[in-house]
Image: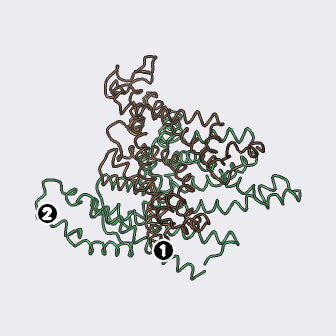
Amino acid sequence: MTTQHATASKPIYGESLSQRAAKKIRRQPHTLLCLGIIAVYVAIAIAGYAGLMPDFQERVGASYEPPSLEFAKILGTDVFGRSVFYKVLTGVKTAITIAVCVTSLAIPIGIFMGSVAGYFGGKVDAFVVWFYSVLVSVPYILLVLAISYLLGKGLLSICVAMGAVSWVGLCRLIRGEFLKHKSREYVLASKLLGATDMRLIFRHILPNVFHLAIITASLMCLNSIMSEVVLTYLGVGVQDGSSWGTMIADANGELVQGKWWPLTGVTLALFFLAYSLNMVGDALRDALDPKLVD
Amino acid sequence: MLSYLVRRLLQMIPIVFGVALLVFILFNTVGEDPVRVALGTHATPASIAELRAKWGLDQPYHIQFFNFLVQIVTFDYGESYITGAPLSEMFLDGVLVSLSLTAPPYFTAVILYVSLALLIAYYRGNWFDRISRVTFVAMMSITYLVYIIFFQWLLAAQLDLFPIRGFARGLDGVEYLMLPWVIILFESIGHDIRMYRTIFLDEIKADYVRTARAKGATEMSVLFRHVLKNAMIPILTYTVIGIPYLILGAFLMERFFSIPGVGDLMINAINTGDFPVMKGLTVTIAIGYSVFNLLTDILYAYVDPRVKLG
């Protein structure tokens, strides 16, 4: 250290929060494994959009064949002789699509509403707080059910419904942080230099609170996937058979007849994705929390 | 205290107004025309006009909205479009059924899982803690639906411990409610224990714990006499704020086991396009949520002398 200072050949930069977080996570093999699993799911979804996925509607064998070593029948077949494995893969595509759509809708809304409310205060703040208090007072599942009922059944409407409701948590967090940051010295100094409001919000304060958006996003992916399964079961949501919710609903009657493989297939697919998202969310929270810096 | 209460109650008014406005916009202006849904495609213009007048839908929007506000204030939501039954009675009945489904496992869970979490906090950092962490995250990663299907299959169909589904009023209903209780209790383990553990670990870092250890208190006495008492504040908050959701019932449970609670009412209303039920239930639950929110804040000040209301 001291020699570097003396020669001044290379300036020393402090680590940013994200660099330190990346370093921390790289040292956790379990988290890396979970990240890898998520990457596989995303790759499957992309392959589905590229048209590389086999058609899940196609019959590959007789009705209710138990799992065998053949590729298409590795998880057995369903009542129509369709491959359970292909159906599970199609479900991956639906689940990842929902996670990406809901998150990319709700996170920007949450950031925008939270930063505007926290930064400007006054009437704007009062309005935003009133607005999210109203949304929070109505239970999540009720509101999503109502909105997706009104928009009609389908992938897009359920994404819009969940996105329109899910931003509140992040908005609250960001608003709270903005209230703290807006009177800090670095903000006042920049203001004195003539920075505009937009520059202060997006260039100066937002980078300091952005880790909250990353943590929230990872949990939102998880929640939206889990909620979609339940909503589809309840009769709104994705009804074209490509959702894990439909498969689980069908599996209900099948289990009693001793046909355990459709339910096992979906449960495992959902389990590995949810477990990985849970673990990565936890790891991100630990790694990005500035209070936990050691 | 009284002035605080009055102010908080007054603050609820804009929130309830907002919920009413949201619900009204969603159902009365954006949604399908309930008259057309009810009468089908072959209705005559005369019968459409008649039904519209009966339901008050021929009025301009601002009058309709005002009527809706009057319904909320008087807790008289009129009648169901489908069955014609008075809604206020339907709601009260549904609330009681939902509570009988969700309240027993909810309060059992608080006692059971707080103790279990305290035990895990006692063994924090060692293998027991680590294994339980992975187990609970794994349990949280299985969807509620699979728990319901699996336990119904295992406990009712295979082992024949409970009836498969059904409902009866009064004490006879306990027989049918046992299986849902077990499932609710089981499903909430992962989430609850992880949260209680975090609460305990936050407290264990506090200065008063170090003082207690320094004066020679045993680990057991530190946990039960000091940490548990202080942790009761966040635990209580979490418990009380969850109560309005008990009224909503476990949506899925009621659907799955055909239990006629509030969740089941709501799903039926959505499937049949029964708008008054949807609107009334949503507003009622929102009011319940606001009231319990206020109750939590008052309780908070009661159990923690450092918190001043005002």
Is residue A220 found left or right of B91 in the rendered image? right
Callout 2: 10 Å neighbours few (<14), some, many (20+)? Answer: few
Closer to the camera in the image, B171 or B48: B48
Tag 1: residue type?
A: Gly
Q: Residue at x 42, y 58 (%)?
A: B262
Q: Residue B95, how many percent across, how many down?
A: 45, 61
- Tag 2, which secondary structure? helix
- Chain that appears green: B
Q: Is residue B82 above or below residue B8?
A: above
Q: Is residue B78 above or below residue A6?
A: below
Q: Residue at x 42, y 60 (%)?
A: B94
Is residue A128 found left or right of A33 in the rendered image? left
Label disc, if present, on residue B47 of the rendered structure: 2
Callout 1: 10 Å neighbours few (<14), some, many (20+)? Answer: few
Q: Residue A189, how many percent across, how many down?
A: 59, 66
Closer to the camera in the image, A198 or A133: A198
